[in-house]
Amino acid sequence: MKTKIKMAVGIVLATFTLSACAQKQESSVKDMLKDPSQQDEVLTLMVEDHDLGKKYITKMMDNDHATGMMVDELVNAAANDTILAGKLSDMISRYPDLMLLTTHHFMPVIANDSLLSDTFCDHTLEHKDLEKAMHNKMEYKKSMEKNH
């Protein structure tokens, strides 16, 4: 009987001890992350570990606020870094629907700015097939308007 009581007390104490350790560890992680050098160490680990980085990105993509922050930072960085801007453009061009959606979104912005419009036209004229396609489309549109 005494053995059973000792065993039960031992199990209860072990449970309380493990429970206390688990709770203390949670708060110690939060406390640890209050230290900027510890934050930097954790973030560096996440950036350098491919699998952990992917998990972090997935977690951020599941959160609208975090996704918005990532997009803002990426666009701001690309605006000041031609290499990053090129990588971003290359990535977008792999997804034609996204590319068309993006182009469609920017057309009113381009149309309302004379410098952007002029630059856009210059870029378009650099591509003879695109220039010809736009010319044909405009001529077709004119002919349709005359017939109606």
Image: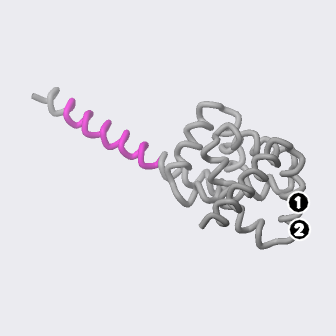
Please identify the quadrant where the N terminus is shown.
Answer: top left
Based on the picture, tell me whether residue 144 belongs to the magenta stretch.
no
Please identify the quadrant where the C terminus is shown.
Answer: bottom right
Query: Residue flagged by tag 2: what amino acid is it?
Result: Leu
Residue 102 % position (x, y): 66, 54
Which residue is at a point 89% across and 47% down the rendered structure image?
126
Q: For this rendering, which residue is in front, 51 or 93?
A: 93
Most extreme residue toward the front, as rendered? 147
How packed mark 2 is, by other alpha carbons closer than 10 Å (few <14, some 14-19, many 20 or more), is: few
For label 1, the residue is 119
Most extreme residue toward the left, as rendered? 1
Based on the picture, tell me whether residue 23 belongs to the magenta stretch.
yes
Query: Residue flagged by tag 1: what amino acid is it?
Result: Thr
Which residue is at a point 25% across and 39% down the rendered structure image?
12
Q: Are marks 1 and 2 in contact (CB under 8 Å)?
A: yes
* Image label count: 2
Q: Which residues are magenta?
A: 6-24
For label 2, the residue is 115
Q: Is residue 13 left or right of residue 71?
A: left
